[in-house]
Image: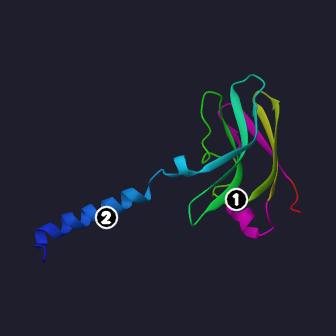
Amino acid sequence: MKLPNTLKCPVIFALAMALLASCGNDDWKTTDEVEILSESKSPDGKYIVTVFSCSGGGAAGYVYTNINLREASETLDQRDFLLGEHLWNSFSDITVDWRDSVNLEVTYRFAGDHPDYKTKNGRTVPKKGNVKISYILLPTD
């Protein structure tokens, strides 16, 4: 069956929209497996910092360890992290220390010595909310 020209564009557009809609789904919110490795409240109780490990992604798969900082009233969002930009297993030996209610110190190391770890995941978040975050990068083993 041949479609008339007047129907081709709307049909192609509808198919493209259906494909694009499925690409931006949020399945990870319910399928990621998150393990909390450590968690602590700021001295005034307004913020929570969580060191966690996350795995998911089905056959393609990913596993990463990172840090989340949020207000105490918020739930953990494993995609809102302080180290790096990607879901790479790039960090290890992560520890956190509240210096006071608005200063957090993070100590960590890169999981490997490959230059891509440093190039792709060198970003850190310097401040979140009222909390200033300082970082200590340990030498790679």
The C terminus sits in image quarter: bottom right
* SS label for mark 1: loop
The N terminus sits in image quarter: bottom left
Which callout, 1 or 2, points to the residue nearer the camera? 2
Tell me where residue 139 sits by quadrant: bottom right
* SS label for mark 2: helix
Numbered tag placed on residue 16 in the rendering: 2
Q: Residue at x 72, y 52 (%)?
A: 65
Tell me where residue 61 sits by quadrant: bottom right
What x and y, as percent, mark residue 89? 71, 60
**Residue nearer the viewer, 5 or 35:** 35
Task: Name which of mark 1 and mark 2 comes first in the sequence.
Answer: 2
Query: Could you tell me the amino acid type at mark 1?
Result: Asn
Query: Could you tell me the amino acid type at mark 2?
Result: Ala
Numbered tag placed on residue 121 in the rendering: 1
Q: Residues within 10 Å of mark 1 (few under 14, many from 20)?
A: some
Q: Residues within 10 Å of mark 2 (few under 14, many from 20)?
A: few
Q: Which residues are magenta?
A: 111-137
In screen coordinates, is 55 left or right of 6? right
Q: Residue at x 36, y 62 (%)?
A: 19
Against 89, residue 48 (above or below) is above
What x and y, as percent, mark residue 75? 60, 35
List the single residue furthest toward the bottom.
2
Query: Quick check: is 81 in the magenta stretch?
Result: no
Numbered tag placed on residue 7 in the rendering: none
In screen coordinates, is 21 left or right of 136? left
